[in-house]
Image: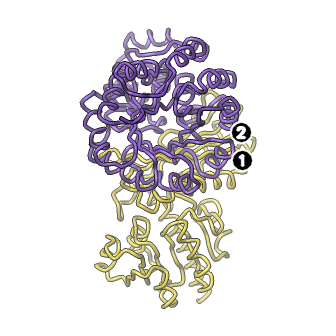
Chain colours: A purple, B yellow
Amino acid sequence: MSKIKIFDCTLRDGNHALKHQLTEDNIEDYCLAMDGSGVYTIMVGHGNGLGASSLQVGLALLDERTMLQTAKKNLERTKLGIYMIPGFGTIKDNLEPAIQDGVELFEIGCHCTEADTTREHIEYLCNRGLETYGVLMMYHMASPEKILEEAQKMQSYGAKGVILMDSAGASTPEMVQRVIALLVDNLHVQVGFHPHNNMGLAVGNAYTAVCEGATIIDGTLRGFGAGAGNCQLEDIVAVLEKTGKRTGIDLYKMLDASDQVMPDIMGTEFGQDSISIVSGQAGVFSAFKLHVLNAAKEFGVDPRDIFKELGKRKAVGGQEDMIVEVAEKLSSPMGSRNSNVNYQLESLL
Amino acid sequence: MNKIKVGIIGTGNIGTDILMKLKRSSILECGIFAGRNPDSKGIQLAKKMGVPTSTESIRAIEENPDCCEIVFDATSATVHKQNAPILRRLKKFAIDLTPAHVGKMCVPVLNLEDCLLLDNVNLITCGGQATIPIAKVISDVHPETKYIEIVATIASKSAGPGTRNNIDEFTQATRDALSEFTGIEHTKAIIVLNPAEPPITMHNTVYALIDNPNMDEIRRRVREMEAKIKKYVPGYSILLEPSYENGRVTTTLQVVGLGDYLPKYSGNLDIITCAAIEIAEYYAREKLLKRG
């Protein structure tokens, strides 16, 4: 059985949980602690990737080149990686500078039905001999057959692998089983999975994906990330070790980093809560959470109702501007349901 | 009244929508509808309408230069870069609907008259056409605006292969145009495709970071701008008036299409094809006047 590659996106997805306020010290401490731990890549950036620092999804504290340069300085044995969604970032404004800054691994992502919007970027990178993976976000919103079709497009553009993101944490193990098995049977490139933990299944779903033949797991230390968080890498690495699957990870080194560096980085309360559970059930992009809480507060509506409505409207990543509209609509006299939850949330914020 | 002949290159969503809109024009008529794909729905439709068609793309115009005076190029950024010098040599007025940015960028409500003496005008992108006028209003009231950002969300079904293959140029061209028209250096453009069924209407948000904005003046000028744009894009409307919180001014607008080719959710087609027709009609009217 081939080695399972662990992609570490703590400094990318974790940035969501910090409203994109990662500091240079955070990045430096993390990279020093994790360099050479055996993770295949350490990915750094705004939560939504390169070019995503914006009023729409949140401004990052650091500009992206500072993030990349800081990480690069502190990584000797582990590849520096980035994520980018075309439509947010461009070749000229974001990929070219990232290449100059020494990024070695690229994930190019899009909503799961829009793979052809990644062609230009995947081809651009592959033509330069750079290691590039395609990412299909919110994979639960399309049938496994459609996902395969989109993954095959990414394969044809030259991607070295295709990673499915369960961006809403909406997966059950059966869903993971079906789609990963279908991709593994029909693609000749690697298949990866990036779970979220809204309904408490992130590690289980990652393990299911590996059992079905996925060879890349994309997750974070402590599961630190958008919404309820990600697949906790300490857990999945321990499970894989226990079941005899090779990861090449020094688990103690990873656990030490988790103990020594993560408390400083995380700072805030973090993890599953009633809001993220409903958001997972509704199948809404995990990173909407903070925006939904803000809008719920502003308009005096139940954030769970906002998530339900966003789910009905099939909002996709990047549509944060829809949240305010939904909240405003729900707050009109007809849709109003002024519950205790608002009060409880306000005390949390 | 005489009509001026136009050619359309590119038989995808945008080219076909222009073809449908020409039916309403009293001064433009389609002399050639040319693409590459003989199976394209647009070509079939044009044939039914009795419009001359070709699958030789720009060659059709090179071989029969008299078929048109104005050319709408609705191919792709890469193809338009090849077409532009040919159209110049043939002395055609080129209206470029790709994000190639060969000619001057034109938003009719802002700089139509500056563009008519040129031989190639570029329509930026649908997102640019929809949002730049609002950004311009804001930067006129507050030239000290620190940052402007736009988000354009369009239905997946209304983004054809040309748009998808050019998503990078699309994003970059929108951002570049935003800076050029507003004079503000720090800008950002975000493009989102949404595959929801039923498809969503084209939806745009303009954000601006300003200290102490004059909201009354901004609101008044945004309403004026909306009225001006409605004259050539009837489905253009402000959804949420400019509002101010946490240092940012937010304006949300949508574009409902006329439903000429694709259904009404495809306001992204109308905002750019209506602009193209507006430019062509203006140009044609001047030509006809000169001819007496």
Viewer-proximal residue, B110 or B177?
B177
x, y percent for residue A64: 65, 36
Viewer-proximal residue, A72 or A288?
A72
Dot 2 lies on which element? loop
Residue under the point 48% across and 19% down:
A297
Amino acid type shown at disc 2? Lys
Q: How many residues crowd mark 2 within 10 Å: few (<14), some (14–19), many (20+)?
A: some
Residue under the point 24% across and 30% down:
A174
Residue B184, numbered label: 1
Residue under the point 50% across and 83% down:
B4
Q: How many residues crowd mark 1 within 10 Å: few (<14), some (14–19), many (20+)?
A: some
Q: Can residue A104 be seen by looking at this rendering?
A: yes
Q: Quadrant of residue A329?
A: top left
Q: What's the chain of the residue with tag 1? A: B
Label 2 to label 1: alpha-carbon separation: 7 Å
Dot 1 lies on which element? loop
Residue that mark 2 sits on: B146
Farthest residue to the right: give it: B144
Q: What's the chain of the residue with tag 2? A: B
x, y percent for residue B159: 42, 56
Amino acid type shown at disc 1? Ile
Look at the image and tell me in which quarter the C terminus of chain B lies.
bottom right
Circle 2/circle 1 CB separation < 8 Å:
yes
x, y percent for residue A152: 36, 52
